[in-house]
Image (cartoon, rainbow, N blue to C red):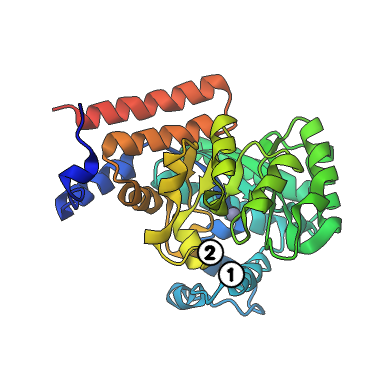
Amino acid sequence: MIPDRDALGPPPVPGKEIVKDLHAFIAGLPKAELHVHHVGSASPRIVSALAARHPDSDVPTDPEALVDYFSFTDFAHFIQVYLSVVDLVRTADDVRLLTYEIARDMARQNIRYAELTVTPYSSTRRGISDRAFVDAIEDASIAAEADFGTVLRWCFDIPGEAGLESAEETTRIALDLRPEGLVSFGLGGPEIGVPRPQFKPYFDRAVAAGLHSVPHAGETTGPQTVWDALTELRAERVGHGTSAAQDPKLLAYLAEHRIPLEVCPTSNIATRAVSSLAEHPIKQMVAAGVLVTVNSDDPPMFGTDLNNEYLVAAELLDLDESGVAALAKNAVDASFLDAAGKAKLNAEIDAYTMSWLAP
Ligand SMILES: [Zn+2]
């Protein structure tokens, strides 16, 4: 019989060596990422290249000044800064550069597969044609896969703050142009004042056309938004879902129906959606049997990357190497890779973990 954990006292605090080893393990671990934004992945290196192309912008070109520029007071401020970087992506060639360079940054972290959340409306309303936009991301993805070995797939996302016109435009581009790499349909931007049910007709059309439904929900609003995403938008996976932890019935529903959550711990702190890592509800989600995946959201803007998010999750969930590998396999299982693709990436994770743990 295993003694009650409480009877044993608090769990041991990992020493610096263990954290260092876990860090190295995570760095080499083959990984999938399911919740990461296109423009939000622009590292200071990429943003400064884009800002230099467009000197009329307010965004600093100096990578060091960008660190201050990316420090947010609240979620509204984050959206404001985010949109100023969106404004740097003005031509199809900017789109291509951004996409290709993101894949380079991912490959450096051993991210083998990513479903990148892309917002075509942000580009088409700035005058890039829908066809040029789609061609730019597809072209970058083919080149990136050949050069870096990282597979990119797309989630086309409605920017909620831009209203139903953007929903119509996003749906039209997704369904009429239907790029090869498009697997899912999403909804992002602020949740407060942007009720989810109004987007139901667009999600119905996308799902009928074979796209998977992956809206953001419950990041800055309560569990009802997550219920709305499930019942109105037919969510198969939920972006964040942070407030689901406030509703035991919702957690039980997510667990029973195997609807994964895309958890982004550092993002939640940076946007003040959660006040501290100690208060992050990831532990309750896992305890309720929900399939939890770990993601970076807008990594350079939040001073993080996927490897760091795994380290944060390992600390919050008290995981060793095997536990971290299981978390990485959650992301593969929750992805929209086909069965063969999932089996291959899971086998790589197993082989890596076994070789790491071998005496
Ligand atoms: Zn997001």
Instruction: Look at the image and tell me in which quarter the C terminus lies.
Output: top left
Residue lying at 59% horizontally and 69% vertically, measured from the top left: 75
Residue 226, how many percent across, how many down? 65, 48
**Left or right placement of residue 332 versus residue 40 in this view:** left
Whether residue 216 is visible, yes or no, is yes
Determine whether the residue tagged by mark 1 lies in a helix, strand or loop: helix
Q: Are marks 2 and 1 in contact (CB under 8 Å)?
A: yes
Query: Measured along the vertical axis of the image, is residue 147 above or below residue 354?
Result: below
Nearest to the eye among marks 2 and 1: give it: 2
Whether residue 44 is visible, yes or no, is no
Q: Amino acid at mark 1?
A: Phe
Instruction: Look at the image and tell me in which quarter the N terminus lies.
Output: top left
Residue 41, how many percent across, how many down? 54, 56
What number of labels is visible? Answer: 2
Residue lying at 50% horizontally and 65% vertically, measured from the top left: 301
Q: Amino acid at mark 2?
A: Ala
- Which disc number belongs to residue 75? 1
The quarter of the rendering in which ligand 1 is drawn is bottom right
Query: Measured along the vertical axis of the image, is residue 280 above or below residue 135?
Result: below
Residue 126 location, quadrant = bottom right
Q: Is mark 1 within 8 Å of ligand 1?
A: no
Residue 8, how many percent across, how many down? 16, 44
Q: Nearer the viewer, residue 223 or 80?
A: 223
How many C-alpha atoms fall within 10 Å of the one at disc 2: few (<14), some, or many (≥20)? some
Determine whether the residue tagged by mark 2 lies in a helix, strand or loop: loop
- Which disc number belongs to residue 273? 2
Residue 218, how many percent across, how many down? 61, 54
The alpha-carbon separation of the residues under discs 2 and 1 comes to 8 Å
**Left or right placement of residue 58 versus residue 193 in this view:** left
**Left or right placement of residue 135 versus residue 22 in this view:** right
Of callouts 2 and 1, which one flags the residue occurring earlier in the amino acid sequence? 1
Residue lying at 79% horizontally and 38% vertically, measured from the top left: 206
